[in-house]
């Protein structure tokens, strides 16, 4: 990605997500009205376990995005498409939340989803270029 401002916005969005998800895992009061529809006064254990898995997923997204920004290969290739699908689902879930503060989470979710959508398009473009420029064996003299 060449746009440093956008890359910075993506990393800021990741930081916000880690802060918020970490708050749920630890039962922090600042996260109560920003997660799970704002319906809990204390986060239950099962929800904290789910958010531990969510935290691991965000860390993995950061690794994949960082690899892309450094021009390194992303493997498995399908993971980017999965992140786009999960991102769209996250946007919809946050937008439909009963909590006004949780609805603001649409912004970082959109930024991250847009970044992975851009990576997906870049991968598709690189695949098309590789297929076109692949030698056929008929061009030998």
Image (tube, rainbow, N blue to C red):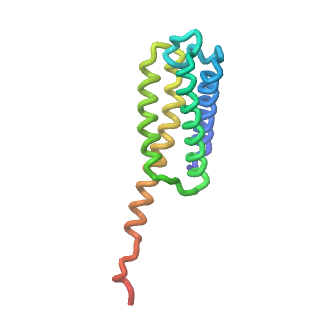
Percent x, y of residue 31: 60, 18
25 relative to 77, above or below: above
Q: Considering only vertical position in the picture, is 61 above or below 39?
A: below
Q: Quick check: 133 left or right of 26?
A: left
Residue 55 in the image: state x and y as whole percent: 58, 33
**Residue 68 percent coordinates (x, y):** 56, 51
Does residue 27 sit above or below 59 in this rendering? above
Q: What residue is at 47 percent from the left and 46 percent from the top?
A: 80
Residue drawn at x 39%, y 86% is 140
Q: Residue 85 sits in which quadrant?
A: top left
Foreground of the two, 120 or 49: 49
Nearer to the camera, 37 or 138: 37
Please give left or right for residue 95 compared with residue 7 in the image: left
Residue occupying the point 45% across, 43% down: 117
Q: Residue at x 52, y 13 (%)?
A: 38
Task: Count every numbered label the image shows and give the total.
Answer: 0
Q: Residue furthest front?
A: 45
Residue 136, by quadrant, is bottom left
In the picture, residue 132 is in which quadrant? Answer: bottom left
- From this viewpoint, which residue is outermost toward the left? 138
84 relative to 44 in the view: left or right = left
| Picture coordinates of residue 113, whole percent (x, y) | 48, 37
**Which residue is most to the bottom?**
141
Quadrant where the C terminus is found in the figure? bottom left
């Amino acid at each position: 990605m060449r746009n440093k401002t956008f890359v910075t916005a993506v990393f800021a969005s990741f930081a916000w997500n880690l802060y918020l998800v970490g708050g749920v895992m630890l039962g922090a009061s600042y996260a109560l009205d920003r997660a799970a529809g704002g319906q809990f006064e204390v986060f239950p254990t099962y929800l904290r376990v789910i958010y531990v898995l969510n935290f691991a997923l965000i860390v993995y997204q950061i690794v994949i995005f960082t690899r892309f920004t450094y021009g390194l290969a992303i493997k498995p290739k399908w993971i980017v498409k999965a992140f786009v699908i999960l991102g769209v689902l996250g946007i919809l879930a946050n937008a439909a939340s009963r909590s006004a503060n949780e609805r603001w989470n649409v912004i970082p979710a959109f930024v991250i989803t847009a970044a992975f959508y851009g990576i997906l398009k870049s991968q598709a473009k690189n695949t098309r270029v590789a297929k076109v420029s692949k030698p056929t064996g008929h061009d030998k003299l």
